[in-house]
Image (cartoon, helix red, strand yellow):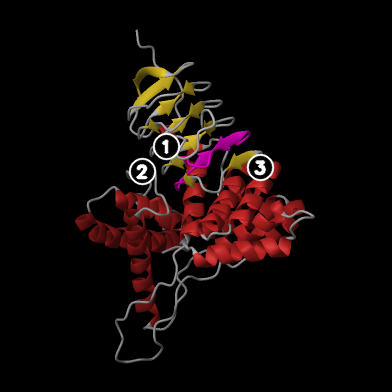
Amino acid sequence: MRTVLLAELVTVARVLMALPEAERGPFLQRLLYRAHAAHQVSKRLGRPHPAWGDGSLSAAVAGLPRRREAFATDPDYLAALGLVIAALAGRARRKSGGRRAALGLSPGAPMCYSAVAKGDPAMPETKPRMSTIDPVWQRVCDEAVAAIQAEPLLGGLIHSSLLHHPSMERALAYRFSLKLASGEMSEQILREIADEAFSRDPDLGQMARADIMAVFERDPACHRFLQPILFFKGYQAVQAYRIGHWLWTQGRIDLAYFVQMRVSEVFGVDIHPAAKVGRGLMIDHAHSIVIGETAVVGDNVSMLHSVTLGGTGKEDGDRHPKIGNGVLIGAGAKVLGNIHVGHCSRIAAGSVVLHDVPPCSTVAGVPARVVGEAGCAQPSVTMDQLIADQA
């Protein structure tokens, strides 16, 4: 079988997710057999196998149905990915006789597997222990290497921001400190704050991965995983907010306010550190975003520039909107007051929402009113902002 790229593991996992669990194991074994056989045919005849391709996993699954979304925090996705890796590890173990074997993954990030006990006759069938599975970071590193080859002038930026770091969390901490540093707070202090946040709350790293996948899946201008980390201020602002929110939950209120201030100054995104924002958030363009103190944003939400989730009047207490999962909020929309926007709804661009929005519906206008159904199961994923003619 040909060298397996990490991106191929993600593809195969998405194919497995489209199958019932009982069929995944047998299907995967047949798939690996076919890939191996196709590779042998390709080497012997100098041309791809007529049915199974060139021996790569990508060719073996070409044309098969697959799940389009595969979030890094989805248990089913992680289970499917683990099944693929375990199958590859088993092949490597059988070929190496129980010794540590390279799994054929492409270079660009540290190996994610610990060795099998070497030479222990009592454990000939022990599976290798998996310390981490990080397909998102592996893909970022692979893309970084390719980006340097394509544009050497960016080599310093890409090395210092990505390839120099052993993990995505360390890279994000570096970007956080670099972008938010000022004469009031040095890079070193901000780096220590971010490193502490990521080490004490592993969920921060998982949310960052889910956010990258959300941007990649939904933003047509995003063609690589490395783009949000390096170039997209919406993604960078959200990750900085998440660190500020962690500080808030630790009781470090003033430091959290400092992070909010710098995020607003640098990125033009003003998210109160007490606001609760779910994973898989995509903010396109991210100019003039305002999210208030008691606002709640669910998982897999998409919003465009100039969105406000604000309060009304001068009342204290719980005064900001609650946005459900899978909601799409169009550019310039204002959602005001302690109201609820139901799951998988759409808010049209320029709308002013003052009342609760039912689930799976579309609202538009000033003030906004229900103009129809959402039109699909996941508006935030499809990003379809057109309102069908209701006549």
Q: Is residue 30 positioned above or below 356 on the image?
A: below
Q: Is residue 92 positioned above or below 334 on the image?
A: below
The label on residue 322 is: 1
Q: Which residue is mark 3?
A: 264
Neighbor class of circle 2 (other Cα within 10 Å; few <14, some 14-19, many 20+) is few
Query: Label 2 vs label 3: CA separation?
Result: 45 Å
For the C terminus, the image quarter is top left
The label on residue 63 is: 2
Looking at the rendered structure, the secondary structure element under dot 3 is helix
- Report the mark closest to the observer, 2 or 3: 3
Relative side of 302 to 375, left or right: right
Residue 297 in the image, given as x and y percentages of width and height: 45, 41
Q: Residue at x 31, y 58 (%)?
A: 31
Which residue, as the protein is rendered here, is positioned at the far right?
A: 183
Residues under numbered marks 2 and 3 in contact, where contact means CB atoms less than 8 Å apart: no
Which of disc 1 and disc 3 is earlier in sequence? 3
Residue span colored magenta: 277-295
Residue 194 in the image, given as x and y percentages of width and height: 61, 61
